[in-house]
Image (cartoon, grey):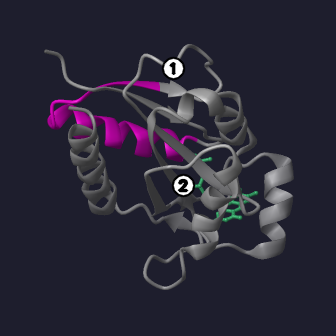
Amino acid sequence: MTGPHVLIAYATKYGTTKEIAEEIQDVLTENGIESDLINVMERGIIDSYDAVILGSPIYMGKMLVEAREFCQHYKPDLADIWLAIFVDGISCCPPGDKKTSPLIAAIDEMYESVNPAMKKVFAGDFSPAGLSEADAQITDMVHPPIGDFRDHKDIRTWAREVASAISEHIV
Ligand SMILES: Cc1cc2nc3c(=O)[nH]c(=O)nc-3n(C[C@H](O)[C@H](O)[C@H](O)COP(=O)(O)O)c2cc1C
């Protein structure tokens, strides 16, 4: 008998969310769960997976458009596949200081397309270096906190919770 097969699909502009997704994949592997990691823009057939973990950064209060399109495109499949969604952003940073509810709201906004079994907000990473001109103009106006606020313990703890939920769900 083979174990669950999981798809981890991430959207990213500057790589942070991909790295979080990779960390989650490492934890799944440590827990004996096989997974494939893809960018949400790599469209394929997903109905052979037992579970999907979707990750997106938050930009201007929303999940990245390609992550939203992924939900819309795969809505029929995702109605039957166990789903977890995580987002990362800096409006909850420094962690512990600020509320995560606006970021959860960005996930909840997807409710017409998908209904995730698990949702999570991670503190993200923001640096003004290397931003596109448009992003630099936006962030110049709002002066966001600068730094890599990722909490790797938090990421790994959630990934373990996801691993047990998937193992329990897929028997
Ligand atoms: C133009 C711009 C807008 C952003 N808007 C938000 C936002 O609305 N809420 C938030 O929490 N973080 C916001 N962020 C921070 C990103 O979500 C954070 O840096 C994230 O970790 C980046 O992930 P990525 O490298 O995978 O794209 C914004 C960053 C930029 C550059």
Q: Secondary structure at mark 1?
A: loop
Residue 78 location in percent, x, y?
55, 34
Q: Residue at x 48, y 62 (%)?
A: 121
Residue 123 location in percent, x, y?
48, 64
Residue 34 location in percent, x, y?
26, 24
Marks 2/1 in contact by CB < 8 Å: the verdict is no
Quadrant of res 95: bottom left
Q: Secondary structure at mark 2?
A: strand
Amino acid type, residue under disc 1 in the picture? Ile
Reply above or below: 20 against 142. Answer: above
Instruction: Specify start and end residues of the magenta stretch as a single range.
Output: 15-37
User: Is 133 on the left-hand or right-hand side of 4?
Assistant: right
Which class describes the residues within 10 Å of circle 1: few (<14), some (14-19), or many (20+)? some
Where does the C terminus fall, quadrant-wise? top left
User: Is 132 on the left-hand or right-hand side of 152?
Assistant: right
Q: Residue at x 61, y 43 (%)?
A: 14
**Label annotation for residue 46:** 1
* Residue at mark 2: C-beta within 8 A of ligand 1: yes
Residue named by callout 2: 87
Where does the N terminus fall, quadrant-wise? top left
Quadrant of res 15: top right
